[in-house]
Image (tube, grey):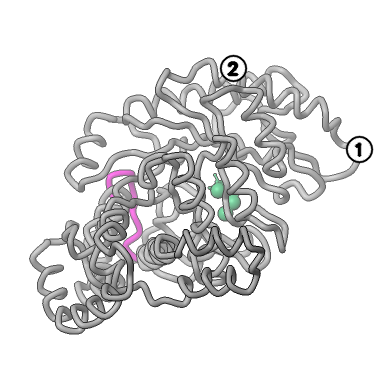
Amino acid sequence: MQIEKHKVDELNHQLSAKHTHQFEHIAADVNNVEGVLTKLGAFNVAIPSWALGTGGTRFGRFSGGGEPRSLEEKIEDVGVIHALNKSSSSISLHIPWDIPENATAMNVLAAQHGLHFDAVNSNTFQDQKDQKLSYKFGSLHHTDKAVRKQAIEHNIEVIKYGVQLNSKALSVWLSDGSNFPGQLNFRKAFQNTLESLQEIYEALPDDWKVWVEYKPYEPNFYSTTIGDWGQSYLLASKLGPKASTLVDLGHHLQGTNIEQIVSILLMENKLAGFHFNDSKYGDDDLTVGSINPYQLFLIFNELVEGMDARGMNHATDLGWMIDASHNVKDPVEDLLQSVQAIKIAYAQALIVDKAALVAAQNNNDVTLAQEILQQAYRTDVRPLVAEASLRNGGSLDPVSAYRRLSVREQLISERGLKTVATGL
Ligand code: AOS
Ligand code: ZN
Ligand code: ZN
Ligand code: ZN
């Protein structure tokens, strides 16, 4: 399955009169529209290999048709997404859900789709068959040195796979924690985790990073050993410059001011990047922007402000990734929607009148500061996102193009109706 560019062009052509009208309208209003378009055009978000099939909940899983049955087919699916939106140029693998048996062939296939490999993720939150010791009571924090060692070795093996794929970061999420008070000595668990991560850190190639994800709950309902950004930041600081904190938007207690966390981590050069998703209650892994797009905008507002203050490259200096799980939607459609939502929030943040906002802040003009932010947020920037995609050879409207090109139908006819994505 590969999307032919001329078909995308034909669909764009049908939309072109309407698009031109809408684009010219907003272009007249936006300062430095070419600068905004260049930044939007350079922006890419990695697709997680585990989101290409239906995830399900603990109660059931309703697989859709044409799901990728192998790593090759996952790469193809990301190729479809990228051909349509030109903003998903990489795939993030989870090991051992994805084992790149033949890395050279995977690199060639990815390159054929204009893709590369983003961060590799390790998995010590499940027991694999043939695994000697169990992670029932944790992995890197375990009371038993032998279990910790097994988990460390797994992470080092993941780095080795990543090196073959020209990946540059190891992303670690642990489910280590405790389910009941008294079960765990917090301090020892933290120290064990640190020591384990130090051994993994030692194995990182020079140009690699390790990203430490945090999560306050589930599957450990009393405590998680890397439960919040403070604990992740502490680990990352003790580890050294190659380590930083990964923010998964769903991994916060309700009401947490995520944009403030982002701002401070960025200030300290300890923000690794994101697992984008949205949530209403917990780690729901919903489509980005489906529940709280204003929060997403506020996060991007801090990102643009903070990255500019540090002279960072928006497109390349942080890890931009989606982490999602789909129960009822076509995963590819969901991912297309997510990337669009991210680009919309980014575009809105780019058009904030920064000088006016700084002045309002310095004058403590609270009303004006809010007006300035909401002016940007309430602007319909979709024509900017569409124009950036068009200029890169992508679709003006990726979701509708995906449907009109009957991509899912083709995937079903190639792979069958009763497919379950490998992995999860
Ligand atoms: C789990 O809640 C985390 O978000 C991790 O990033 C995890 O590795 C990923 O979601 C795959 O399940
Ligand atoms: Zn995550
Ligand atoms: Zn999560
Ligand atoms: Zn999540």
Mark 2 or mark 1: which comes first in sequence?
Answer: 1
Instruction: Judge depth for marks 2 and 1 and give the one in front.
Output: 2
What is the quadrant of the N terminus in the image? bottom left
Residue at (58% x, 28% y) in the render: 131
Residue type highlighted by circle 1: Gly
Is 312 displayed left or right of 192 in the figure? left
Q: Is residue 341 above or below residue 140?
A: below
Specify whether residue 128 is in view. Answer: no
Residue at (79% x, 41% y) in the render: 178
Magenta region, main secondary structure: loop
Asked whether mark 1 and ligand 1 are closer than 8 Å, the reply comes as: no
Check residue 199 in the rendering and tell me which mark sits there, or answer none.
2
Residue type highlighted by circle 2: Glu
Nearer the observer, 283 or 313: 313
Neighbours of disc 2 within 10 Å: few (<14), some (14-19), many (20+): some
Q: What element carries label 2?
A: helix
Magenta-drawn segment: 64-73
Number of numbered labels in the structure image? 2
Asked if the magenta segment contains residue 71, the reply would be: yes
Is 159 displayed left or right of 70 in the figure? right
Image quarter of residue 318: top left
In percent of width and height, residue 243 lies at 55, 29
Neighbours of disc 1 within 10 Å: few (<14), some (14-19), many (20+): few
In percent of width and height, residue 39 lies at 31, 54
Q: Is mark 1 on a helix, strand or loop?
A: loop
In percent of width and height, residue 244 lies at 56, 34
In percent of width and height, residue 354 lies at 47, 59
Residue at (24% x, 35% y) in the render: 107
The CA span between labels 2 and 1 is 28 Å
Check residue 182 in the rendering and tell me which mark sits there, or answer none.
1
